[in-house]
Amino acid sequence: MIQINLKKSLQGANGVMQLDLNLEIAEGQFVTLYGPSGAGKTSTLRMIAGLMQPDSGMLSVGGAVWFDAENGTNRSVRKRGVGYVFQDYALFPHMTVLENLNFAKAKSTSQTLVNQLLELMELGDLQHRKPESLSGGQKQRVALARAVVQKPEILLLDEPLAALDAGIRHKLQGYLKRIHEEFKLTTILISHDVSEIIKLSDYVYHLEAGKVIAQGKPETLFTGQSISGKFKFTGEVLKLEQEEIVSVLSILIHTQVVKVVVSHEEAEKLQPGDHVLVVSKAFNPLVYKLENG
Amino acid sequence: MNWEPLLLTFKLALVTTLILFVIAIPIAYKLSRSTSRIKPVVEALVSMPLVLPPTVLGFYFLVAFSPNNAFGSWLSEWLGIKLIFSFPGLVVASIIYSLPFMVHPIQAGLSGISKSITEASYVMGKSKWETLLRVQLPQIKPALLTGIVLSFAHTVGEFGVVLMIGGNIPGKTKVASIAIYDEVEALNYDAANAYSLVLFAITFCILLIVYLVNGKYLKGFWK
């Protein structure tokens, strides 16, 4: 059981933000932190790892207190021994894949675990290569294996797949799932990708501006709102055209221009440049599978 | 040709570089991580020998190490060290004189290592010391080589500081650069030319090796 009750004031893009978290994570769970950038997700992981010091609160992992502002307990990064996968992989460039893993491994850990992970992550053929000669997906697998070889109590994953293209991301999600099933590590993932979250995690915390604004099982949290059959998009009005009976709006939604028909009265309230919400309901969308989508 | 001044020059450069390497790493490490307000002051002090005339440095050393002053007399009375007109004095002065040439490349190298790589090592339970030796320094080998070679070459090229603090004692403080000056004054151009050619050739070779290695012409050298 991990109990997180931490406060920290952070200097964000929009001034000072108060990070105020109260989470409880059961042992062996796969939990995701979801939310916009600047919500405090990475800071949360850094505080758990001991790379950032909270202002107040307490943190306990499996009954051991790692941080307690009251009595000044603050276990050092080195002694917390979490597994941390950094966004930029942080592989040691002067070591081979195998050396990276061996560096992370505790002396008491047997070499069998290293071999097992090399096999599980399909890194056997790459073990004598230096990181610079690996692709992004391969580096990420090394980073993941290196974090697991530490036999950490908690595995922290900071947007590990964000920089990869969809096909490789999909494959790596499979590796993550395998790792979690094999080693049953309590895992905290940061992700923006809803399908990834639904695929991997047991529980989701939705963070915004340093607070948890929603939480629950991923299926209920993410499908709850869209199951009503409503499609909602935000866009920008590009052009207004008056026709005989109706007006036609050209709206830029993401990278697509969509034409929408509205009445003259509705059109009068709008002008090019306005930001609008386009909502449609009660219709049967057609769904096509995209290759590697 | 008398080889003594040349041998003395390279002995001085070697000893200076070895000592500098050991003391520059902690200085560069502190500077690369520090956010302290006095950091610019320390950086300015370290860089001073770059711009100060060597004679200024030599003059202050002369004053400081003089047995007539408190520091100089303390050194000679308590430690029995005489730094003026002696080889140890030359070494001490050379260390200060070449300090920026060792500290700057190492500091730049350490600052260039991504923060997450260092943090990854801490997360793996490694101490700062172990991280420095096994993660940070091995990554900045080209910077270490640059620091070593520049300090060595700069010490070889020393003149003003050496003349002020060491004088011109054959076999003790008469290094090649001073010998050249001496020979020219005595109008022995052939001898001056011999010393000069040797210095010219050796320093060129040293610098060429640095640029070859760091320019990766010798591929795989650092791997």
Image (tube, rainbow, N blue to C red):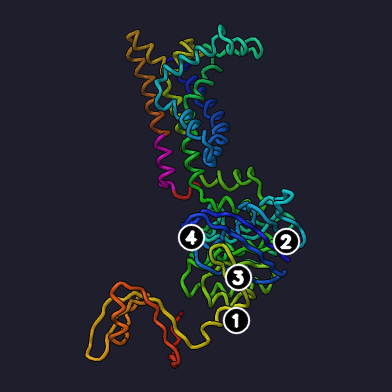
Circle nearer the N terminus (3, 4): 4
Secondary structure under the numbered disc 2 in the rendered image: strand
Q: Where in the figure is residue A192, as x and y percent of width and height? A: 51, 70
Circle nearer the N terminus (2, 3): 2
Q: Which residue is identified by label 2?
A: A61
Circle nearer the N terminus (2, 1): 2
Identity of the amino acid at label 2?
Answer: Val
Secondary structure under the numbered disc 1 in the rendered image: helix
Identity of the amino acid at label 1?
Answer: Thr
Q: Which mark is residue B58?
A: none
Q: Where in the figure is residue A110, as x and y percent of width and height? A: 73, 60
Secondary structure under the numbered disc 3 in the rendered image: strand
Of tags 1 and 4, the one toward the viewer is 1
Work out how far the residue at label 2 is from the one at label 3, CA to CA, in angstroms: 18 Å
Q: Which residue is identified by label 4?
A: A133
Q: Where in the figure is residue A19, as x and y percent of width and height? A: 58, 59
Residue situated in front as seen by the camera: B91 or A156: A156
Residue situated in front as seen by the camera: A254 or B10: A254
- Does residue A174 appear to the left or right of A232 in the view shown? right
Could you tell me if the residues under marks 2 and 1 are in contact, i.e. CB atoms within 8 Å?
A: no
Q: Which residue is identified by label 3?
A: A205
Q: Is residue B7 visible in this depiction of the protein?
A: yes
Q: Which residue is drawn at 43% across and 33% down?
A: B206
Residue situated in front as seen by the camera: B30 or B173: B30
Q: Do labels 3 and 4 share a chain?
A: yes
